[in-house]
Amino acid sequence: MKVLLSREELAAGVCRLAAEVRRDHGAEPLTLLGVLTGSIVLVADLLRQLEGPVEVGMVWASSYRGTATRPGSLELRLDLLPDLTGRRVLLIDDIFDTGRTLSALVDALKERGVASVQTLVLLRKPARTEVAMRPDYVGFDIPDAFVVGYGLDYDGVWRNLPEICTLEPSDLSTTLGTTPGTTLG
Ligand code: 5GP
Ligand code: MG
C-alpha cells in the first residue's frame, strides 16, 4: 500500500473546502447530505470546520463492486432523507469517479423541492468522468488508481486508515477474508 495523501494534506484539504463553501454561502443555513458509506469520515471532519447553522442527513448509494475495482449497477436509497423543502443542500461523497452516483442523486434531490443542490467531493479522478455534471467543490484530483482509507473501502475493509492510499496488486489478496461480492458504498 502506498500513501497518496497524508493526514496533514487531508486536513488542509478539508479546511480549504469548508472555507470555499462558507465563502459562497455566507452564514446561510446548509443541509449536508452524506452519501453512505464512504463519506462518513469526510462529513465528520467537514462538519466541524463549517461555522454557522448546519443540518446533517444521509443517503445511501452503492455501485456493486465487491472485490472488483470497477463499477457495476447503481443502487440508491433515499428513505433516510430529512425534509428538504426550501433547503440549500450540499451533497457530499468520498470520490467522483465516473460521476454516475452523484449525477443520479442530484436529479433525485431536485424533485424534492430543494432551494439548491451543490456537490462536494474529497477526491476526483478526472480521467474517468462519464457524465456532464461536475462537482462544485473538489478536494483533490488524483490519478486513475483504486484508493482506500479515510472512509473508502476495498471489499468492506480499510475505511479506518487515516490516509488515502493506493492499493498494490499484492494488497488485493490480504483483505480480512470477507465474502467476495460485498456491496461497496
Ligand atoms: P461513481 O458513481 O462516481 O463512478 O462512483 C462513486 C462511488 O464509487 C464512490 O462513492 C465510491 O464508493 C466508489 N469508488 C469509486 N472509485 C473508488 C476508489 O478508487 N476506491 C474506492 N474505495 N471506492 C471507489
Ligand atoms: Mg460511495
Image: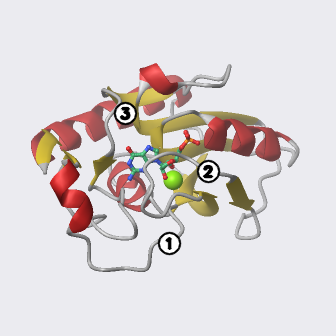
In the image, is 110 to the left or to the right of 56?
right
Left-right relation of 96 to 41: right
Question: Which circle's residue, 3 or 2, is located before the other in the chain?
Answer: 3
* Element under disc 3: helix
Number of residues whose C-alpha sits closer than 10 Å to that of mark 2, classed few (under 14), some (14–19) or many (20 or more): few
Q: Name the residue: 82% across, 40% down.
A: 110
Q: Residues within 10 Å of mark 3 (few under 14, many from 20)?
A: many
Is label 3 or label 2 in front?
A: 2
Three-letter amino acid code of the residue under disc 2: Gly
Residue that label 3 marks: 17
Gap between marks 2 and 1 measured at Cα = 12 Å
- The part of the image, by quadrant, that contains residue 80 is bottom right
Splitting the image into 4 quarters, where does residue 79 fall? bottom right
Could you say which is closer to the camera, residue 184 or residue 79? Answer: 184
Q: Residue at x 59, y 38 (%)?
A: 28
Numbered tag placed on residue 136 in the rendering: none
Callouts 2 and 1 close, C-beta under 8 Å? no
Give the residue at mark 1: 182
| Vertical order, 33 against 27 (above or below) | below
Any part of residue 158 in sight: yes
Q: Which residue is mark 2?
A: 72
Along the line of sight, which residue is nearer the eye, 174 or 111?
Answer: 174
For the residue labelled by badge 1, is the local secondary structure a helix, a strand or a loop? loop
**Residue that appears at 50% across and 72% down:** 182
The amino acid beneath tag 3 is Leu
| x, y percent for residue 22 | 45, 32
Q: Nearer the viewer, mark 3 or mark 1?
A: 1
**How far from the left and from the top, in percent, is residue 48?**
34, 54
